[in-house]
Amino acid sequence: MGLQTEFEFTLPVGYVDREGNVHKKGTMRLATAMDEITPLNDMRVQANEAYLVIVLLARVITRLGSLPQVNTGVIENLFAADLAYLQELYRQVNETGKTTRAIACPHCNNELEVDLARLGGVS
């Protein structure tokens, strides 16, 4: 099996565009070193370190619904649940190269594997 560099996801809430269309399905690619370095030169990031995640996600999300492009304006207008979901997905795929994570069941302590890309929302 080859290296997987793009990961499909479904947002829990979805981005609502100006026409009221909801965009939930998207694709995120693995980040490069340049993706993590370049935003540090962005004046918005220099003025507010919390803005780093906005610029970074705008660089690595390659598709969201039928939007022609994903830019910082789109990421800025995501609901908080979607932003948190994408941050966790970004961490997972860039640390492990996959969307799955092992977790322990709080009731029986058995280890389960969950797919973060599928947890976002019901298709």
Image (cartoon, helix red, strand yellow):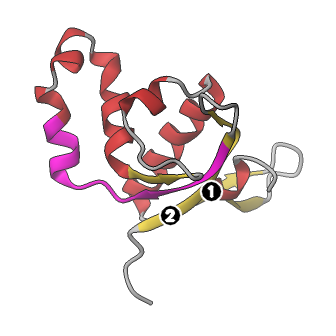
Q: At 42% from the left edge and 61% from the top edge, which residue is drawn?
A: 96
Residue 55 located within the stretch drawn in magenta: no
- At 52% from the left and 47% from the top, the residue drawn is 67
Q: Quadrant of residue 28?
A: bottom left
Residue 35 vertical placement versus 15 (above, below): below
Is 17 left, or right, of 62 in this rendering? right
Q: Which of marks 2 and 1 is nearer the N terminus?
A: 2
Q: Is residue 27 above or below residue 71?
A: below
Q: Within 10 Å of the Cα at label 1, are there few (<14), some (14-19), or many (20+) other Cα atoms?
A: many
* Residue type (three-letter) at the residue carrying disc 2: Phe
Locate residue 86, reporting x and y percent.
53, 41
Work out whether 19 lies above or below 115. Answer: above
Compared with 48, 113 (above or below) is below
Q: 10 Å neighbourhood of mark 2: few (<14), some, or many (≥20)?
A: some
State which region is magenta: 23-38
| Residue behind mark 2 | 7
* Residue located farthest toward the left when viewing the structure as drawn: 41
Horizontal relation, residue 119 to residue 99: left or right: right
Q: Residue 28: within the magenta?
A: yes
- In the orientation shown, which residue stands out farthest toward the top? 47
What residue would you read off at disc 1?
117
**Residues tagged 2 and 1 counted as in contact (Cβ below 8 A):** yes
Relative to 48, is 85 on the left or the right? Answer: right
Mark 1: which amino acid?
A: Ala
Measure how far apart labels 2 and 1 are at the Cα level: 8 Å
Residue found at the far right of this picture: 107
